[in-house]
Amino acid sequence: MKTTLKYLVAFPLLALFLSACESFINDVEPLKDYAANDKLNSEEHMDFLIVGVQSQFADASSQVAGLSDLLSDQLIFTNMMPLATYPQYAEIEPGQILLDNNSVAAVFQSVCRLRRVADDLVQRTGDIAFSDTAKRHQAYAVGYLYGGLARYYLATSFGINPTSPGGVIDGGPFIAQSDLLDDAVAHFEAAVAHQFSLTEQRITNSLIARAYLAKKDYAHAATFAAQGMLQGEDPFVCLYNDVSQNFYYTDAGYGRQQMGVADRFAAYIAADPAEAVRIPLDSLIGRDGGTYYFQVKYPLAGSSFPIMTWQENSLMSAECALRGSGAGDALALVNDVRGSHGLSSLSSVDLAGLMVERDKELFCQGDRLMDENRGAVPWHLGTGDWHVLPIPRAERDANPNLPPL
């Protein structure tokens, strides 16, 4: 059975529930700004609140991944592509990002809303006397899981200055990446404690492994990857439809080609045509007569977006093994991943080769920026350029705990 994040995009009360979160997170006083707040503190409203968290995650996940890929060396922006016109994207791709970039502000706001509604669900669950114990565990599991994911995104995709990743919570002081990742791990571990399904627990353990990978703590990453997703398990995905659409489709695919992909992806396919299975591309002719490639991994508005796969988990185990942590057979793990796509086996693998496999396997999934920032692959921009998306000016202006840039 496929494990998915289910949400309702046409849920009439959902917009009412989220409407108070249109400003930055530190502009929202605790609880009181939520619509019908006191009437939501009951067991019968848990499904409504759970859907609200999952829906907000759908809004945030592919957006933050897409902008992170654009800042990394994976996606490109060039006005030679006829439909590439957003000046905000033109700032992100070279790392010359203004603090009032509204595309960055929108996704930062979305991630902060996710963190807020997830934490709110946890708080409400603790305040309610449940008659249905299973529903109580489900509410806690959802709140902690998505609260952990929001913290992971804040830790790995945003920062206070070009080389200081991290985020803020509830208008507080800046939290450095390492501390925020520790907080994400604590939330994931709390989710595991409330998850009945072993499949869900394995998925969450894989998410914990990824957080430790971002910290360059390969010993702990190996431990949790060993307890993570099993070969052949269905991916943990975020669902979209024609109303709430996958960001890669709308901004980097058939919806509109605002972003293309780096030339090396076409070169991967030229070297081995079988790679087109995991690097699906289409092309267009640019204003200069050149050929530009873009992703079609997400060919439809409703294409699902992978959050965690067994293949990613196996590549984490392989990397840890190559770095001297864990007992995995790196070559066998890599070849299992390749075999799942019908690709031929490698005869050997080192860390450089493993990073090429991650580049191909995790194509357009938002992981490349994290790999660059942890030094697993070289940083592709110059000194002084943004390595993360900046915490926006509106948050800085409203939050007295943040230092000026």
Image: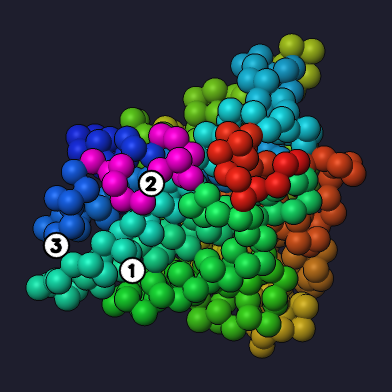
Can see residue 83? yes
Q: Nearer the viewer, residue 219 or 179?
A: 179
Instruction: Calculate the distance from the C-alpha at mark 2 to the C-alpha at mark 1.
Output: 25 Å
x, y percent for residue 175: 63, 59
Instruction: Residue 69: name its quadrant.
Output: top right
Query: What amino acid is labelled 3 in the image?
Result: Glu
Q: Which residue is mark 1?
A: 141
**Residue 3, visible in the rendered structure:** no
**Mark found first going from the N terminus, 1 or 3:** 3
176 in relation to 380, above or below:
below
For the point 32% across and 74% down, which residue is it? 195
| Label 3 residue SS | helix
Amino acid type of the residue that numbered disc 1 sits on in the rendered structure: Ala
Q: Check disc 3 and report the residue beneath it.
A: 43
Residue 151 circle label: none
For residue 29: magenta?
Answer: yes
Front-lying residue, 27 or 121: 27
The quarter in which the N terminus is drawn is: bottom left
Identify the magenta region. 22-35
User: Few, some or many C-alpha atoms within 10 Å of disc 2 (few <14, some 14-19, many ≥20)?
Assistant: few
Q: Quadrant of the C terminus?
A: top right
Residue that numbered label 2 is attached to? 29
Q: Is residue 36 left or right of residue 157?
A: left
Q: Nearer the viewer, mark 2 or mark 1?
A: 2
Task: First in sequence, mark 2 or 1: give its number.
Answer: 2
* Residue 191, placed above or below residue 301: below
Where residue 149 appears, as percent x and y from the top left, is 49, 59
